[in-house]
Each structure stands twice: as structure tokens, then as C-alpha cells.
Image: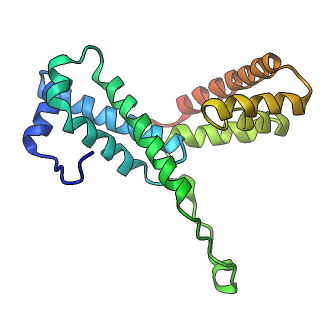
């Protein structure tokens, strides 16, 4: 994206028109897309999911004039495709930056831990709760199974299957069964939560 590009009201209005002819529905679609982008970046472990979601939206808005005239299909899918590119850039930048960890001193050892789960959405709290309920072997397997991306994921799963002494297909089936248990547990947990 051009460094000097600035979001204008006209460009934003064009985006809303592209999302839906009715301005009210377009506003709701925009908010749903933004929330979904934030969830995507949060699930991928990004430290600034809101900023990355906004960057994704800005990139789409920068091209909305040409998109509005020729794009076929659900506009939300285009946003998700752009979010994938933004995530890859985020990973590349994060990989090239050194990690600065504070040294353990008496003063920061006594500091209370920050509760990071307080601002995570209910789905993620439910997922964490359901993961804790799994037997340790299953929890470890499913967490390790869904690590890595692309070719690294394939190699990782092969080595995991070898480590467990099973075929890759058996590993896939085992992970799938654990995932089904997790999905049911999360769904039940979310249904038990009070409505906002």
C-alpha cells in the first residue's frame, strides 16, 4: 500500500455502497467484517489484531473503485484474502525483529501476572476451558497438530506421526475426532453463556 495514501470519506462511502445499497445494512456488514478480521488475527496469535484488521480494510478501500465495478461474489471473501497477505507481512516483520525479554529482577518478579483472558471473546474463553478439560495427551496432540503453515505444516505432521508411531492418516483421524469433541464442547459452552 502506498505510504502517502489516506482514507477519505468518499472512498469509505464507496466501500459501503459496494457492501450493500442500503446504508444501514452496509454498516452492519462492515462491522461484521471488521470483527471477523480481528478474530482471524487474534486466532493467528497477532499482537495487534485491531491494527491489522484496519490495515486490511484500508487496503481494500484503496482499491474499492476498481473492485466495485468488476468483483463478483461476497465482498467479505475479498477482505479475508487481503487479510492473508497482511498476516504474511506481519509474520515476515515479526521474524526479522529481535525479541527483547526483560531480565528477571526482584521488582518484576513480584508484579502480578496480567490476566490476558479478560478481554478475549467468549468463544476463546470457551475454547480454553474445553482444551483444559481434554486429557493431557489429546490436548498436546491437537495443539501440536494445528501448528505451522503450508509445507512446514506437512513436515511437522509427518514428524508428529512418526513420533507417535502411527500413520499420517491415523494422526489426521485422531486429530479430527479430538476437534469434534472440542467443537461440541465450545458450542455447549457458548450456549450456556448469558446473552449480552
Kindly give the residue lying farthest to the right in the view shown: 165
Q: Is residue 99 above or below residue 54?
A: below
Q: Quadrant of residue 138?
A: top right
Give the image's coloring scheme. rainbow
Determine the image quadrant of residue 112: bottom right
Identify the image quadrant of the C terminus.
top left
Q: Residue at x 53, y 57 (%)?
A: 96
Q: Horizontally, is 161 left or right of 65 in the view? A: right
Residue 119: in sight, yes or no? no
Which quadrant holds residue 27? top left
| x and y, in percent, of residue 157 in the image | 75, 30
> Is residue 111 visible in this depiction of the protein?
yes
Task: State the image coordinates of residue 76 (x, y, percent, origin top left).
Answer: 32, 26
User: What percent of the width, then of the height, locates residue 156?
Assistant: 74, 34
Residue sitting at the far top: 72
Identified at 70% across, 85% down, the residue is 106
- Observer-nearest of 58 and 121: 58
Q: Quadrant of the N terminus?
A: top left
At x 44% / y 35%, what residue is drawn? 84
User: Residue at coordinates 24% horizontally, 31% vertically from top-left?
Assistant: 28
The x and y percentages for residue 45 are 54, 47
Number of labels in the image equals 0
77 vs 142, nearest the viewer = 77
Residue at the far bottom in the pictured view: 106
Q: Is residue 168 left or right of residue 42?
A: right
Amino acid at each position: 500500500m502506498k505510504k502517502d495514501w489516506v482514507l477519505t470519506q468518499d472512498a469509505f462511502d464507496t466501500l459501503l455502497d459496494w457492501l450493500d445499497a442500503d446504508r444501514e445494512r452496509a454498516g452492519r456488514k462492515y462491522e461484521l467484517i471488521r470483527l471477523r478480521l480481528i478474530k482471524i488475527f487474534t486466532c493467528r496469535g497477532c499482537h495487534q489484531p485491531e491494527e491489522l484488521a484496519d490495515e486490511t480494510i484500508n487496503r481494500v478501500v484503496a482499491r474499492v473503485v476498481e473492485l466495485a465495478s468488476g468483483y463478483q461474489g461476497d465482498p467479505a471473501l475479498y477482505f479475508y484474502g487481503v487479510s492473508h497477505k497482511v498476516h504474511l507481512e506481519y509474520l515476515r516483520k515479526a521474524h526479522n525483529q529481535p525479541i527483547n525479554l526483560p531480565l528477571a529482577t526482584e521488582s518484576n518478579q513480584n508484579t502480578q501476572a496480567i490476566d490476558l483472558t479478560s478481554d478475549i471473546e467468549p468463544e476463546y474463553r470457551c475454547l480454553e476451558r474445553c482444551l483444559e478439560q481434554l486429557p493431557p495427551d489429546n490436548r498436546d496432540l491437537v495443539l501440536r497438530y494445528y501448528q505451522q503453515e503450508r509445507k512446514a505444516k506437512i513436515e511437522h505432521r509427518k514428524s508428529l506421526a512418526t513420533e507417535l508411531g502411527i500413520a499420517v492418516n491415523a494422526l489426521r483421524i485422531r486429530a479430527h475426532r479430538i476437534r469434534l469433541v472440542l467443537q461440541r464442547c465450545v458450542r455447549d459452552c457458548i450456549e450456556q453463556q448469558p446473552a449480552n
